[in-house]
Image: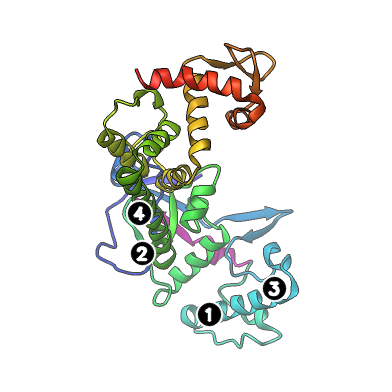
Amino acid sequence: MSDITIVEKYQQGKKQKIAIRPFFDPSVSNMGLENYQMSLMEGVYHEEQLACLELNGVKRYVTGLNEFAPEVRLLDADARDAKIKEIRATVAQLERELAANVINEDDPDFWNKVKLLRPDNSIFWDKITLRCGNDPLFLDPAKDPYDLIKLNAIDAGGFSIVAKNLESAKSMAVPPKFYLDRAESSAANRTEVSKLRNRALSELQKLYDKQASKMFLVAKVLDINSTQYTKNTPNDIIYENMDNYINGFSVDRDKRRTAQKFIDAANMSMEDLKLTAIVKDATIYRMIASKSDGFIHDLTSGATLGKTPVQCVEYLKNPLNEEVMLSLMQQVEKMWNS
């Protein structure tokens, strides 16, 4: 369990490429802090000691610098040899810088000659801690040996409050308070989302200019409040709402997901798009509904359409079910034209 302490801000103005930053989900309420890109109250810091696992009285610190750790032993031969070489090179560098101890990384007695960074040196590892707050905590492993130690430990999972990158933070069942931001990978992530959003906005502009009827159906499919759109709704209103949807200003705040969903919808055939919109609105208008058998039924004809909206669309596309499809379409389009 991490302790919470109040301390002064520090490291202002540093421009290193590696930093620990607060992680927050703008779509999840956190006392309003998410609106200010904060994960903690102002002036509050979380401090955590390096993780230590103990089994049968034997301590193992999660440092990322232990070639005897299970995660290293489980690698295949080539990957394990490469990892051991990388660990020894780092440990040898740290021994020189912190203990003036020069060791050849190829020495058969390498670990017997290590003084400070031995895996069982609890006096040293117990002092490795990490303190993070809303301000970026910059790491400069090229200049600060302790930053190099912390960087390896974060990559190995040695601090529970910090994810090793932004993608890991997003995928964790219990979101961490912080994530490790390497400028290159984070920039690539941001650029990817920006490119995706720009593609979606480009598709929206094309629909507005040349396929207004398709833009109407896309809005029907994507907007949770689909019944607000009728054939009398101005195209500018639909455009504005879809622009907000793509930019994550609607119910769904995930810009990557909203942009991709818009692109996918815009690329659907008119037939699939219209039938998907019909099934969605027919459900809202109670023209079709799920019954106790688990299937969705047309309440006018009694026809069984399927268990999911996708199955309903496939049912309506079948020429054998044209009568049901035309009847449902007429009912829904009557609402659209009102």
Query: In the visual, does 152 lie left or right of 239?
Result: right
Q: Please determine whether, in this image, residue 237 is positioned above or below residue 178.
A: above
Residue 282 is situated, as x and y percent measured from the top left of the image, at 50, 20
Q: Residues within 10 Å of mark 1 (few under 14, many from 20)?
A: many
Q: In what quadrant of the picture does the C terminus appear?
A: top left
Residue 104 is situated, as x and y percent measured from the top left of the image, at 61, 88
Residue toward you, 236 or 5? 236
Find the magenta span and give its range. 120-133
How far apart marks 3 and 2 lie (CA) works out to: 30 Å
131 within the magenta span: yes
For the residues carrying marks 3 and 2, which lies nearer the camera in this image?
A: 3
Say the numbered circle drawn on residue 198: 4
For the residues carrying marks 1 and 3, which lies nearer the camera in this image?
A: 3
Element at label 4: helix
The color scheme shown is: rainbow
How far apart marks 1 and 3 lie (CA) works out to: 22 Å
Residue 177 is situated, as x and y percent measured from the top left of the image, at 44, 47
How far apart marks 2 and 1 lie (CA) works out to: 23 Å
